[in-house]
Amino acid sequence: MQDFNPFDQVDSKPEFGSPLSVAIAGRDHETMQMVRRAVETGQVMLAYQPIVRACNPERPAFYEGLLRVLDHTGRIIPAGDFMDVVEAKELGRQMDTWALDLGFRALAENPELRLAINMSARSIGYPRWMTALRQGLERDPTAGERLILEITERTAIVMPDLVQVFMSEMQSHGISFALDDFGAGYTAFRYLRDLYFDILKVDGEFTKEIASNPDNQVIAQAMLSMAQHFDMLTVAENVESWEDAEFLIGAGYDMLQGHFFGAATVRPPWREKAQATRA
């Protein structure tokens, strides 16, 4: 029997008729099959990307664990290629559970690690995910203070009252919360007041090439001002150049994330170091 989750959407009947709708349906079906096969065979992993301090970009403040799956050829497939298809289904809840389990394993491997794990607000109503969270906190009394849960902006408003209660309970265990992809166009600004996020991650749409884009400069500075008003730390996502990093640091952002500071990797530094020690 499948776990019931009140957040899950009921699948609508597919629309047939146009070549485009048929192509999209076929692509989504293949994506679902790929992810389901990866879950069933355990071909799921995290890639770790550093988030650095603006005041000291040489040293990560924490890492973000990003989901990856292996397809039938052994290629590593990033979450961006499949999460939109599975997010509103139980398979999305299973992927969130995998991410959380793998995150707790990484925290156990490296006692100095602070790690952010992505989740959908829908997973709050998924019993297996909640069990994984509570068991992880029970196994390691330091895990809560080292765990950051990133809730995507588009799911944070699904049931904000439930999200608010959940966040309040988990913050009492030391867990921090980040509002991911802020500015992507989903959340009313009042949720910044009602939901007590610790970290605001500004969507890369507004930070990319910001050094030469006056419009993005105004928007990013307005988001920074809002975050500071609500006592939230700020992370600028998708930083790809020193020019953009320099502008964001000067503007007052607390942390930066992007390929300029390090790409996501399934072989993070602490595992490389442990392997070298064993060798």
Image (cartoon, helix red, strand yellow):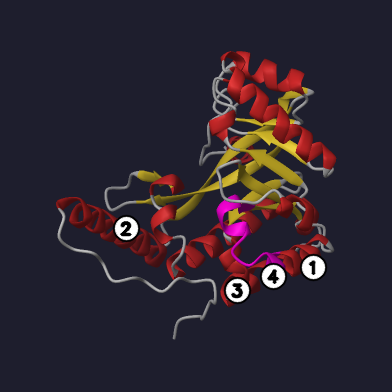
Q: Nearer the viewer, mark 2 or mark 4?
A: 4
Q: Give the quadrant of residue 58.
A: top right
Amino acid at the residue labelled 4: Leu
Q: Residues within 10 Å of mark 4 (few under 14, many from 20)?
A: some
Neighbours of disc 2 within 10 Å: few (<14), some (14-19), many (20+): some
**Does label 1 or label 3 sit earlier along the sequence?**
3
Q: CA distance from mark 1 to mark 2?
A: 35 Å
Nearer the observer, 219 or 180: 219
Residue 230, labelled with which disc?
A: none
Residue 80 screen position, x and y as percent: 44, 45
Disc 1 vs disc 2: which is toward the camera?
1
Q: Which residue is mark 3?
A: 125
What residue did someone put label 1 on?
169
Q: Residue furthest bottom?
A: 1
Q: CA distance from mark 2 to mark 4?
A: 32 Å
Query: Residue 5 location, x and y as percent?
Result: 53, 76
Which residue position holds label 2?
34
The answer to the question of whether label 3 and label 4 lie on touching residues, with beta carbons closer than 8 A, is: yes
Asked whether 124 falls inside the magenta stretch, the response is: no
Nearest to N terminus: mark 2 or mark 4: 2
Compared with 65, 130 (above or below) is below
CA distance separating discs 1 and 4: 11 Å
Q: Disc 2 residue type?
A: Met
Q: Which residues are magenta?
A: 151-163
